[in-house]
Amino acid sequence: MNSRTTAHRRVAAVLASLAIGAVTLTACAGADATGEPGAAPTSPAAETDASELQSGSGVPEECLDAFPVALGAPDPAAATLAPADWPADAVSGVLCQTTETPDGTRQSLEYATDLSPEDVLDQLEAALPASYEATRSDQGLGEQIDGSAGAVHFTVTVRPGAYAVAFGTD
């Protein structure tokens, strides 16, 4: 099997795992003092608006709608797998969150943007250095860009109002 294809599948699997984890966290229901599942929480902390928790944790205001479960200030320096010539400023957007696997072989940067998904992919694709191998295709969840730059593989996924860049190594 082509190692580039295997790496792309691994990066896609990491992105899917992160998305499932975020959905799982939002689906967890609270319990009242009687322990009834799904009952309205009664603690003062639970009554705090989620957007207040986010903004108090350092999440940029532009990210509140695109990433409703993001917490903490995003750290652009966390993208240690990004190639030195990665066109980080090619697309207008606000970094909302960064994630990394425990072993450090996969990282994801997630952005909020006012651009359409097509414009995000068009602008990023045009800005990629000629030395990169990249393909744009629909993998079943809409168009994305998959590619490699040396030993680093990347996937760019888009949705209305947001996009994510995942980097991985073998």
Image (cartoon, rainbow, N blue to C red):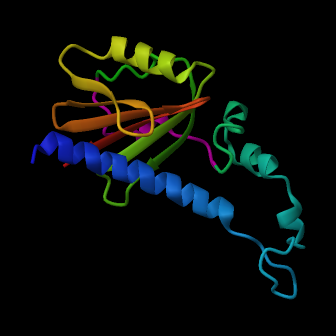
The span picked out in magenta is 70-84
Residue at 62%, 62% (x, y): give it.
25
Residue 153: x and y in percent read: 25, 37
Is residue 163 found left or right of 104 in the rendered image? right
Q: Is residue 80 magenta?
A: yes
Residue at 42%, 23% (x, y): give it.
88
Is residue 109 found left or right of 107 in the rendered image? right
Q: Residue furthest left?
A: 1
Is residue 126 found left or right of 91 in the rendered image? left
Q: Residue furthest front?
A: 140
In the depicted structure, whether residue 104 falls above or below residue 160: below
In the depicted structure, whether residue 57 falls above or below residue 128: below
Residue 26: x and y in percent read: 67, 59
| Residue 51 shows up from this direction | yes
Q: Is residue 73 magenta?
A: yes
Residue at 63%, 20% (x, y): give it.
114
Residue 14: x and y in percent read: 38, 52
Q: Residue furthest bottom?
A: 34
Residue 131 falls in image quadrant = top left
Residue at 44%, 57% (x, y): give it.
17
In the depicted structure, whether residue 162 falls above or below residue 104: above
Is residue 46 found left or right of 97 in the rendered image? right
Residue 67: x and y in percent read: 64, 42
In the depicted structure, whether residue 43 falls above or below residue 24: below
Q: Nearer the viewer, residue 47 or 14?
A: 14
| Residue 169 shows up from this direction | no
> What secondary structure do most residues of the magenta stretch adopt?
loop
